[in-house]
Amino acid sequence: MLLVRGMIVGLAAGAAAFVFATLFGEGPVGQAIDFESAHAGGHDHGDEPELVSRTIQSTVGLATGTLVYGVALGGLFALAFAVAYGRIGRFSPRATAALVALGGFVTVALVPFLKYPANPPATGSPDSLGQRTGLYFLMIVIAVAGGLLALSLGRWLGPRYGGWNANIAAIGAYVALIAIVEFTLPTISEVPDGFPALVLWNFRLASLGTQLVTWTVLGLLFGALVGPRRHVHTVPADKAAVSAGR
């Protein structure tokens, strides 16, 4: 049931991401396509058949992508919640869901974005697409693995130095690790000369905002769904255990 709830919440998160991307991302995408057309000579490619129209891409295509991504991410979120609940501290289900969402956003979205931010159409090069994609997913793996190591470090240091100091040390170690990795990995610059800086900024901001909306809806809505029910089942069991101990 937990997995099903996660997928349902993921569907809602995907719908919210679609609305946000439509409102704030489609404008910069259209401007980037206009730049590409002007840079290529305007109508030089007008005789080429258009396999998928721009209207389909910005509506059905975008909706399908965000909804499928949301459902898949919701299922993974439910699994991560099941692993984290009761193991990262004495947090309520809602607080645990919020922390998992925060950790997911930082490691899966924010950290890779800082090194390899999203690029709009007309700024990518087919020659470096494979390399950029591979490096982006490598950054995600490192960020997630580093986050898990930092969490383990905080739990290990907690009994010795207290929870606050242990958490600060773990966060500092994580930031240092990510800084070293991002400095070491190669930088890929594909933005062509003359591309409007404002369009690039707005697109990247919309891309990161879409991720933020997705993870926020996941954390809040999933916590709202599992919080009350989990309390209903666990509180009587706790009382029963106390009574049995007496």
Image: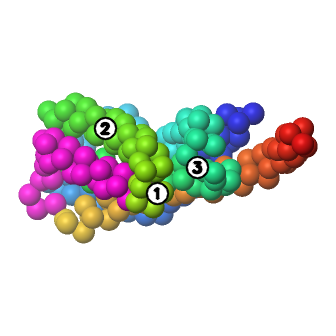
Residue 9 in view here = yes
Residue marked by disc 3: 89
Rendering coords of residue 65 (x, y %): 49, 40
Q: Which residues make up the magenta segment?
A: 167-195
> How does the figure colour the protein chain or chains?
rainbow
Residue marked by disc 1: 162
**SS at badge 1:** loop
What's the CA distance linking mark 3 and mark 1?
13 Å
Judge left or right: residue 218 versus residue 133: right
Give the quarter of the figure containing the C terminus. top right
Residue at position x 72%, y 55% in the image: 224
- Which amino acid is tagged 3? Gly
Residue 18 in view here = no
**Label placed on residue 142:** 2
Give the quarter of the figure containing the N terminus. top right
- Which amino acid is tagged 1? Gly
Would you say residue 190 sits in the magenta stretch?
yes
Mark 1 or 2: in front is 1
Mark 3 or 2: in front is 3
Residue at position x 63%, y 51% in the image: 90
